[in-house]
Structures are given as structure tokens and as C-alpha cells.
Image (spheres, grey):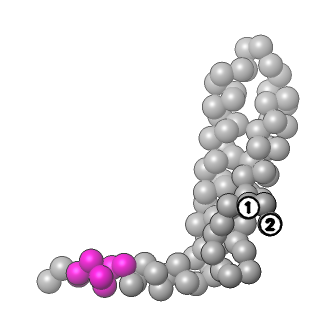
Amino acid sequence: MFASGNYLFSRLASLLARQQVRFLIAGAWNTVFGYGVYAGMLCLFQPRVHYMVIAVVGNVLAISMAYATKVDRDRRIVLVADQ
């Protein structure tokens, strides 16, 4: 009745093997991270720092995270390391 752990693992592995799924995961993570950084910095610094400064700093951090979670040629989501 219930699927075994091996079946679920193999199904998840086959889904992650698809490039579209990996792009969707990376894009969702980058969106959540970007909005989270902006909202967090806005809550912490808004009375003292102009919102546009917070937006620029948050955008730079979000773009850096998007680069760090790029999908490499081996079709894996990786963190960029020294090469």
C-alpha cells in the first residue's frame, strides 16, 4: 500500500535528474532568499537607512547567492568553489 523508501528515493533521484526541475528548485530558492534578505534588512535597518540603500544591498546579496547556486555542466546544483 505504501511505497518503500527505496522507491521514493529513486523517484526523487529521477526527478532531480531533470534539468527543468533543478532550474525550478534553484529559482525558487533564489526568490525566497532575495525576498527574505530584503525583508529582513528592511525590518532591521528601515528607520535608520533609506529603503533604496537596503534594496541595492539586498539585490547584490541575492545576485551573489544566485551565482553561487547555479546549475553546473554536470547538471547538479552546486555551490561555487575555487577551481
Residues marked 2 and 1 touching at CB (< 8 Å): no
Report the predominant secondary structure element of the magenta stretch: helix
Q: Which quadrant: the N terminus? A: bottom left
Return the x and y of residue 19 as percentages of the image width and height.
Answer: 63, 81
The residue positioned farthest toward the top in the image shown: 48
Mark seen at residue 80:
1
Mark seen at residue 65:
none
Instruction: Please state which of residues 21 and 76 is positioned toward the viewer in this rendering.
Output: 76
Q: Nearer the viewer, mark 2 or mark 1?
A: 2
Q: Residue at x 62, y 41 (%)?
A: 36
> Quick one: label 1, few (<14), some, or many (20+) residues within 10 Å?
few
In the rendered image, the vertical position of residue 57 relative to residue 62, given as above or below? above
Task: Tell me the amino acid under the disc marked 1.
Answer: Val
Instruction: Please state which of residues 9 and 26 is positioned toward the viewer in this rendering.
Output: 9
Q: Residue at x 69, y 46 (%)?
A: 34
The residue positioned farthest toward the left in the image shown: 1
Task: Tell me the amino acid under the disc marked 2.
Answer: Gln
In the rendered image, the vertical position of residue 48 relative to residue 31, given as above or below? above
Return the x and y of residue 8 as percentages of the image width and height.
Answer: 33, 79
Query: Is residue 36 magenta-colored?
Result: no
Which range of residues does the magenta coloring cover?
Answer: 3-9
Residue designated by label 2: 83
Return the x and y of residue 72 as percentages of the image width and height.
Answer: 72, 74
Relative horizontal placement of residue 47, taking residue 10 as reference (left or right): right
Query: Helix, strand, or loop for circle 2?
Result: loop
Q: Which quadrant: the C terminus? A: bottom right
Instruction: Please state which of residues 54 and 10 is positioned toward the viewer in this rendering.
Output: 10
How far is disc 2 from disc 1 in space, using C-alphas?
9 Å
Q: Quadrant of residue 4?
A: bottom left
Q: Quadrant of residue 70?
A: bottom right
Query: Helix, strand, or loop for circle 1?
Result: loop
> Quick one: label 2, few (<14), some, or many (20+) residues within 10 Å?
few
